[in-house]
Amino acid sequence: QVHLVQSGAEVRRPGASVKVSCKASGYTFSSYGIFWVRQAPGQGLEWMGWISGYNGDTNYAHKFRGRVTMTTDTSTSTAFMELRSLRSDDTAVYYCARAKRVQWLVPRDAFDIWGQGTMVTVSS
Amino acid sequence: ESVLTQSPGTLSLSPGERATLSCRASQSLSSNYLAWYQQKPGQAPNLLIYAASSRATGTPDRFSGSGSGTDFTLTISRLEPEDFAVYYCQQYGSSLTFGGGTKVEIK
């Protein structure tokens, strides 16, 4: 079975950084891209960026450029999302999700498998 | 990038009724790259429809997607108790954006 399992909840002070992990299983990690999406409490979904599982290419949403870094560790089939200079409005559930199309190297796709989400709370 | 507007914001219906959800794009979507997701409280979203009208694996056939260009529709032919949830559309033809969601609640 295909799964994405994310790291646990985090609490950070404003100005700090957070790094969330997303471990894939049940499929060939390098054959699919991974997207990151966040959802503030009671709000809708917001796309943050994409990373290729094949070659590590990235594409970040304009809003997050300069503040986010997405990486992968192919030896452990894990994707990471680091967000820096945290503010209170970064408080949200952060999801990783797999691109639907295999061997699709374009940072736009539907998401067919989602992680369970990681709650990140930013508070002083 | 294309902005997606979903309507209505909330749909109050009874089990067994038909639900029609709308998603309008500010620009025509290339290749009808439009997906629909269902999200229940405390859960991650779940892909229902991709490429405007193709059902994802495991999506019941009471769910159908239609539309092209800038106007898209998700139809639930007969609401089951487990269908009461929030539904989001997403376009992936030009960058990537989500609509604001439609909540389908029990009347």
Image (cartoon, rainbow, N blue to C red):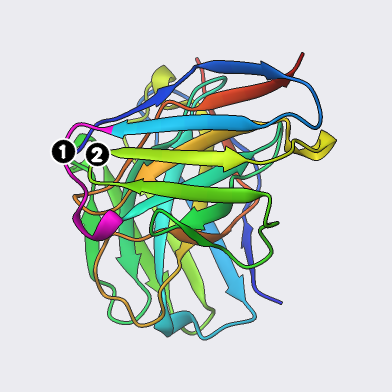
Kindly state the secondary structure of the residue where label 2 is placed: loop
Q: Amino acid at mark 1?
A: Gln
B31 sits left or right of A47 in the view: left
Above-or-below relation of B51 to A10? below
Q: Position of residue A47 (x, y in %)?
A: 35, 43
Q: Residue at x 53, y 58 (%)?
A: A21
Q: Residue at x 58, y 68 (%)?
A: A23
Label placed on residue A41: none
State the residue in front, B57 or B62.
B62
Which residue is nearer to you in this view: B36 or A12?
B36
- Whether discs 1 and 2 lie on one chain: the answer is yes
**As shown in the figure, which amino acid type bears the numbered disc 2?**
Thr
- Alpha-carbon span between mark 1 and mark 2: 6 Å
* Magenta range: B25-32
Looking at the image, residue B58 sits to the left or right of residue A96; the answer is right
**Mark 1 touching mark 2, by CB under 8 A?**
yes
Vertical arrangement, residue A74 with respect to residue B27, above or below: below
* Label 1 element class: loop
Q: Within the magenta stretch, is there residue B26?
A: yes
Q: Residue at x 51, y 31 (%)?
A: B21
Residue B44, image quadrant: top right
Quickly name the residue at label 1.
B27
* Residue B106 in picture, x, y percent from top left: 77, 19
Q: What residue did someone put label 2 on?
A: B70
For the image, the number of numbered tags is 2
Confirm whether residue A20 shows in the render. Answer: yes
